[in-house]
Image: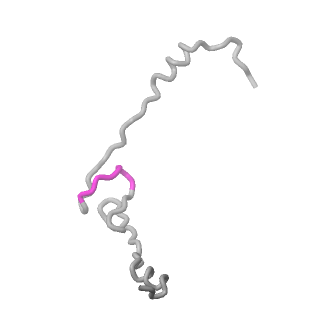
Amino acid sequence: MPNPKRRHSQQRSAKRRTHYKATIDTLSTDKTTGEMHMRHRAHWVENKLYYRGRVVLEKAIKEVAAADEDASGGEA
């Protein structure tokens, strides 16, 4: 493996790294729900997964209150 013949200075490394910048992600408003989301990404709204204004997936919701009553054994 080739190795550098001389050490690179800190200034030289800093000059190379000046182009590495953090960028702000582009946000869009969904035309169906009106929610803000990252572009080209699916997003969840009210247990539904939306992509390009269409519902892609719906999440089934279990009733937590009924499950809690059954787990407690009917104690009052």
Please give the count of numbered marks on the rendered protein. 0
Residue 50 location, x and y as percent? 34, 63
Relative depth, front residue between 10 and 3:
10
Q: Is residue 45 left or right of residue 67?
A: left
Name the chief secondary structure element in magenta: loop
Residue 7 location, x and y as percent? 66, 13
Which residue is found at the position 40% from the left and 69% from the top?
57
Relative depth, front residue between 9 and 31:
9
Q: Is residue 22 left or right of residue 16?
A: left
Position of the C terminus, as image quadrant, is bottom left
Span colored in magenta: 34-41
Residue found farthest to the front:
76
Query: Does residue 73 lie above or below 61 as drawn?
Result: below
Residue 49 location, x and y as percent? 37, 65
Query: Does residue 67 lie above or below 52 as drawn?
Result: below
Occupied quadrant, residue 35: bottom left
Which residue is found at the position 45% from the left and 88% from the top?
74
Q: Is residue 28 left or right of residue 65?
A: left
Is 38 in the magenta? yes
Which residue is found at the position 76% from the left and 25% from the top?
1
Query: Does residue 57 lie above or below 14 as drawn?
Result: below
Query: Does residue 6 lie above or below 73 as drawn?
Result: above
Is 63 in the magenta? no
